[in-house]
Image (cartoon, helix red, strand yellow):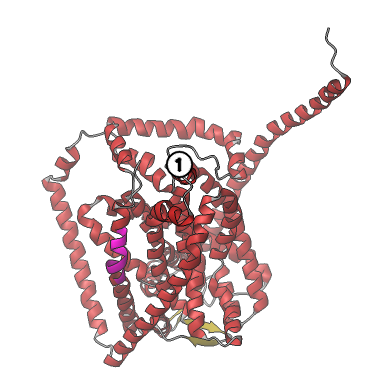
Amino acid sequence: MIRLPESFSHLRSRQKPLLGRAQVLERTWPLLLDVCVACIGLACFYAVVRVAHFWFGHVQPDVVISLSPRMLPLYAFYSVVRMGLAYLLSLLFAVAYGYTAAYSRRLEALMIAGLDILQSIPVLSFLPGVMLAMVALFPSRQLGVELGAIILIFTGQVWNMAFSFYSSLKSVPKELNEASAIYGFSRWQKLWQLELPYAAIGLIWNSMVSVAGGWFFLMACEMFVLGSRDFRLPGLGSYLQTAASLGNMTAIMWGLLVMIGIIVATDQIVWRPVIAWSDRFKFEQTESASRVRSPLLHLLQKSTALNLLHRKTIAPLSERIYRKLAHSRKPPGEYERSGRSASSRLLRATALIAVLIAVAYSALHALALLRTVSGAEFLMILKGAVATFLRVNVALLLASLWTIPAGVAIGFHPRLARLAQPIAQIAASVPATALFPVLLLALVHIGGGMNTGAIALMLLGTQWYILFNVIAGAMAIPSDMREVAELFHFGTIQRWKTVILPGIFPYLITGLVTASGGAWNASIIAEYFRLKNQTLTAFGLGEQISAATDAGKFQLLLLATIVMALMVVTINRLVWRPLYRLAETKYKLEG
């Protein structure tokens, strides 16, 4: 019989309690996770009941926004619900719109032009039509005002998501499309198993910056003046706007602390797990040695209840759906034959005629409204457009100088991303409009003014579009390409020229396009700001749109919006559209 040395026997005696403790933890953690999941489900159910009770109640006239910190939890709850619903609406719209634009040759040019126009229209330009329509639909219920605010937040965050999904679909590698055709994927199978996974990284990072944009415009969407009517909704944005207009720095700090807490919680509970999950969809030939990790995602994957739900419900249901799609798949060419049927052509022609009639009717009424604008007012709007154009380009240049190298560094180094991504998410989500009083006072102290302050506010509100798209582009560069660059000892300039810039180019163009539109959109706040019961302005197109909205001068609001849309569309056609085509051809990632 072999006797263990005394030191080994002592070690064996110590292993027993350690193994027992590990087994207890292994059994306890899933139970605790299941309890947490159940609590989250109950909390969501209570939140739905509370929101439904408030929304379907009677309209609350003359809402007074309290600056007491005790009201912040309730205000934050209402704002988070509005932001969440606006994001879900944005996600559905982005996928549907981007997919249709990418695969419809007849409508692609028209839809992308429409997207250019829509992203160039400021939130306040949507405000009169959206809010009056929603209030008319639900005249005696709070639901009308709430839906109006949600749609306004939607208009401030959807366009870059739609651009991102469209750009991802246009840059799917050729061999993946050929593989899906060889295996006979139906359109739904190709969407769920190829296109959505391939677009996941860009869509997720653009979702983060979209939510950040939603926080930026939250103050304008929850509290605004429309002619003689004052619309106010209890929420975090109206709280911050009330505090900023009164110059109450204590209330501003309380509101910012609550908002930062929400953003940090959202980052840890939502974005970090989703980013770690999306890393599996990275298109590369060899698996990367470094992966983005999320402790929460790891714990959720260990949940017994969630695994049972996936195994017993989700997996069989998805398999049944895929099998049904495979059996109902049409042979090649049948889609074309069915699409050319007489009934299909008649339906398309009828829909096109209806749309043209609606557009012509609206255009005639708009032209009739514009006849009341004087020549001096028209000339003033053109001068304001030039001033805003210069500020937008200065802001884009300053943003690009730091976001491109910073985004590449974050995307290439997962350890740095774990530290920098939450900080960037917090900084992007904190509305610059809440910090603007402090920034403006500092600029006045050092000799600046509203002109410099407007550029700074545009920069704070739009630089994140470029940063987050560059991060997504850097993360999407295959690891084997980076390893080859290291293996052949590429220099810094050669690495940027042959690997980094071509790899991030499609994402960078998407970021610049959306940042440009976001800067034009942000001008309505950057050039027209209320501080301590006085209005500070910088001459520009955004200032004229905000002033026309406050005064209820819809003819000036319409003209200024048309001029802004025409300028943005012209820039997109002359600059960004050729760069998009270059990204789809020369810099498309192929295996």
Q: Residue furthest bottom?
A: 376
Seen in the image, is 170 located left or right of residue 64?
left
Residue 151 rendering spot, x and y as whole percentages = 42, 64
Tell me which segment is drawn in magenta.
Answer: 571-580
Quadrant of image for the C terminus: top left
Residue 540 rendering spot, x and y as whole percentages = 40, 83
> What count of labels does the image hold?
1
The amino acid type, in three-letter code, at marker 1 is: Asp
Q: Residue at x 26, y 49 (%)?
A: 103
Between 432 and 343, the residue placed more toward the observer is: 432
Quadrant of image for the N terminus: top right
Residue 71 rendering spot, x and y as whole percentages = 64, 68
Give the quarter of the image for residue 238: bottom right
Residue 455 vs 213, above or below: the answer is: below
Between 205 and 261, the residue placed more toward the observer is: 205
Instruction: Count residues near mark 1 (Cα–Cα under 10 Å), then give few for <14, some for 14-19, many for 20+.
Output: some
Seen in the image, is 432 located left or right of residue 95?
right
Give the quarter of the image for residue 532: bottom right
Magenta stretch, main secondary structure class:
helix
Q: Residue at x 68, y 36 (%)?
A: 29
Residue 23 rendering spot, x and y as whole percentages = 72, 29
Q: Is residue 474 visible?
A: yes
Please tell me whether residue 572 belongs to the stretch shown in magenta: yes
Q: Residue furthest right?
A: 6
Seen in the image, is 349 located left or right of residue 279?
left
Q: Which residue is mark 1?
A: 480
Q: Residue furthest top?
A: 1
Q: Residue at x 60, y 33 (%)?
A: 304
Residue 184 vs 531, above or below: the answer is: above
